């Protein structure tokens, strides 16, 4: 597994948990770096269960959401499961405004809530 700067990776109960570390994902260079690292993780690790934790993120743009859509398509297309958790208020509001929460993305309040669903 490679070294990542935009997120931390852990494995819990068969789930790859990716915790984003940047408070703001609005800079284009940062977005591109996050996207490249995310695609590298998907290609190298080929996780069948992926949880992305937004607990540290206070702001993100549609560029990050597009990366999430691409990631979900690859994970689910390979027979896997993809979930999000820990959306902070601003990020949560954006997902709701775009009608992405629990329509396009399965969103849970905490990592523990999401991990419990993975184990079912």
Image (cartoon, rainbow, N blue to C red):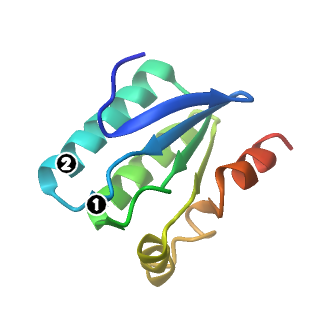
Q: Nearer the viewer, mark 2 or mark 1?
A: 1
**Residue 63 in the figure: left or right of residue 108:** left
**Residue 98 in the figure: left or right of residue 24:** right
Q: Residues within 10 Å of mark 1 (few under 14, many from 20)?
A: some
Q: Position of residue 36 (x, y in %)?
A: 26, 36
Q: Position of residue 76 (x, y in %)?
A: 58, 42
> Which residue in the structure is indicated by mark 1?
24
Quarter of the image for residue 66 reads bottom left
> Which residue in the structure is indicated by mark 2?
30
Q: Secondary structure at mark 1?
A: strand
Q: How many marks?
A: 2
Are circles 2 and 1 on residues that touch, CB within 8 Å?
yes
Q: In this picture, is 79 found above or below 92? A: above
Quarter of the image for residue 109 reads bottom right
Q: Residue drawn 27% across and 58% down?
A: 25
Residue found at the very far top of the displayed protein = 1
Q: Residue drawn 22% across and 40% down?
A: 33
């Amino acid at each position: 597994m490679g070294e990542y700067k935009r997120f931390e990776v852990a494995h819990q109960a068969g789930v790859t948990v990716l915790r984003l570390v940047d408070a703001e994902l609005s800079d284009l260079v940062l977005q591109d770096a996050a996207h490249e690292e995310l695609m590298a993780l998907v290609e190298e690790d080929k996780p069948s269960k992926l949880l992305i934790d937004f607990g540290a993120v206070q702001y993100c743009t549609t560029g990050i959401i597009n990366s999430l859509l691409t990631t979900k398509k690859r994970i689910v297309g390979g027979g896997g499961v993809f979930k999000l958790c820990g959306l902070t208020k601003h990020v949560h509001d954006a997902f709701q405004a775009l009608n992405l929460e629990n329509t396009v993305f399965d969103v849970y309040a905490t990592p523990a809530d999401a991990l419990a669903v993975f184990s079912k």
